[in-house]
Amino acid sequence: MKLITTSISAAAAMVMMASSFVQNVHALSLTIRNDIPGNATSPIQYGMMYEDINRCGDSGIYGHMLRNWNFQASDAGEKPTTEFWSAIGDGSSIELDIKNGLNDANTNSLRLDVADSTTRKAGVSNEGWWGLRVQPGEKYQASFFAKSTGYTGPLNVTLETSDGTVVASAATSESLTDEFQKFEVSLESTASDVSIDNLFVVSVDSAEAAGSSIYFQVFSLFGETFEGRENGLRKDLAESMQGLNPSFFRFPGGNNLEGQTIDTRWKWNETIGPLEDRLGRMGDWSYWNTNGQGLLDYMYLVSLQYCLFRSHRKQYKMCEDFKIEPILDVYAGYSLTGVSVPESDLEPYIQEVLNELEYLTGPADSTFGSLRAADGREKPFNINYIEIGNEDWFSDTYEYRYKAFYDAITAAYPKAKIISTADQKSRLWDIFDDHYYANITEMKSLFSKYDNYVRNNTAIFIGEYGTHVNGCCNGSPANLEAGLGDAIFLTGMERNADLVHMIAYAPMFKREGHEQWNPDLIHFDTETVWHTPGYYVLSEWSKNRADTILQVDHTDGEFGPLYWVAGSNKETKQVFIKVANIGDSEQTVSINLKSLAVHTEGIARVITGDSLDLENSKDKINVKPEEYIFNLNSASDFEYTFSAYSATVLVLHIQ
Ligand code: AHR
């Protein structure tokens, strides 16, 4: 944190030095009203929307490092292949063997035909997802099923650089037999640098195994996962999620819930149980989904422990057990090629949802709750929010579909809050899911959309939003302009937090260079992760949460280029003033606090840059929050200069 002692912010000072921006003095006076009751906010206002898009599930947050690990289908969802695997050792070869399957889910295997090699090594190697990250000192857990005709010795498991240097190794304690058995080993990296040009190798002594065949299935390799969870999340990406200070998690889609066809919908029951029993499916975003990360794995996300460290002039630290609400999106009989399940055929699809809910919430001795218990989770989850379908305004069948699902779900779960995704007249809803992919001009008009909206005991869920600057949703960069569009939008939503209970950005992640949708909030590759301006805006807006929205009177000036919201938090005794400035000049604002006295030192958290085109990349973070202490003139009056092109949170401490 930087300390400044004038009433002009350090961010402003920094930008003044760095550019020729014009300073606009006293264009605006704001009076923040603590003398009249303010609207309550939602305790779960900011959260996450998640689906496997942009290669963010397999190859992304799902920590499994190997590609094509169970040979169920090709990457493009066609017939299985040995893609991403190679044979090691001269003369040895690999094949997809369709006669030696492991079980009903995995009906084939990877066969290694061993020849003696000059290196005395024969094996199979996997190249990972665009590389395989090995980090100094990192521990890895590997497993696979294998059997052999003709060889009965152990197997060696190694992580190797592409030139064959071994950077981690272990041998199985058991030997191969002619029946499939599961092998598990732990490895520890001796690498001195982070690298991704590595291979995962399982090998044997080729002199001893020559002439034999070895069959492999269901490989897994995990580095250190978030909170050490088995089959867990890639740690750095999970930490990025945590950095959003989320209160809810909407999953598993999005389009990826719905399937292109009814048959390729996301089927919860194929995503549970041991890895070797799971069935993959062709995802909606043009690549195969393994379902190695399934329903229960998603649910473990809702128990993320979040430690929020906030510091201000007293340098206090607060650690919260952050409870994240699952928002379960259920398949509602519509798939993306425009097909709907006819009304008379809905029953099995409704039953599928009821079974899913029982799996999650039923006692451990119920039919489906017992499956959950067998999967290692005895205690039922709470599901308080259920969303029926996704963007059902695409279809003309939502009336009958919503009604049928609504009736069955509310009969079994009367306390659940039901989210509708489109207008329909057949039944009520508790919450309506509105999605906004919009350009900056549209975001400015959306800012006030809910100001005069009828409050009729229902709430709005912004299940997806994102500003595009170059048309939705292909080549738009996640630049500062997009981030400021998001800031304007979020500010408008927060002003209406009594109505807009939940907000989530979409899509949340992209693997750089392999995306189907732009812009996205969090970018990553095999090696690392980096954040966009919009990420930092959402993170700041989410970390600085008010429990009351304070009325702000603007005595001079109007919205634009500044957009603002103010709120207070009783527990932390803080006032937050969140301001987006989309203009190309600084704006000095006179701020008066009515019936409120604060300490004369405040904190400004500022996201800014000298051009709207600025983007962050793996190599260069151009835009990120900077924190400053600033001085107020008095306990209830001060001026603050908002930098050009900025999103700012002012944090004041109530006396
Ligand atoms: O976020 C990308 C897609 O946008 C979602 O899958 C869908 O719900 C929306 O159309």
Image (tube, helix red, strand yellow):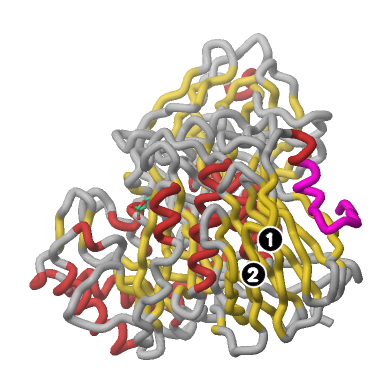
Residue 108 in sight: no
Q: Position of residue 138 (x, y in %)?
A: 77, 42
According to the picture, the residue beneath numbered tag 1 turns out to be 589
Task: Specify the segment rendered in magenta.
Answer: 1-14
Q: Is residue 350 left or right of residue 290?
A: left
Q: Position of residue 334 (x, y in %)?
A: 21, 60
Mark 2 residue type:
Leu
Numbered label attached to residue 270: none
Is 484 or 526 nearer to us in this picture?
484
- Give neighbour class at mark 1: few <14, some 14-19, many 20+ (Cα, 10 Å): many
Above or below, comparing residue 594 to residue 86 in the picture: below
Magenta includes 471? no
Residue in the image at 83% along x and 67% along y:
632
- Give neighbour class at mark 2: few <14, some 14-19, many 20+ (Cα, 10 Å): some
Mark 1 residue type:
Val
Q: Is residue 531 left or right of residue 110?
A: right
Residue in the image at 80% along x and 45% along y:
13
- Quarter the C terminus occupies: bottom right
Residues marked 1 and 2 touching at CB (< 8 Å) = yes
Residue in the image at 67% along x and 84% along y:
34
Marker count (numbered): 2
How far, Cα to Cα, is label 1 from label 2? 7 Å
As helix, strand or loop, the secondary structure at mark 2 comes to strand
Q: Position of residue 538 (x, y in %)?
A: 59, 57
Numbered label attached to residue 30: 2
Above or below, comparing residue 181 to residue 246 in the picture: above
Q: Is residue 508 left or right of residue 173?
A: left
Q: Which quadrant of the view contains residue 223?
A: top right
As helix, strand or loop, the secondary structure at mark 1 comes to strand
Q: Is mark 1 within 8 Å of ligand 1?
A: no
Q: Position of residue 640 (x, y in %)?
A: 74, 59
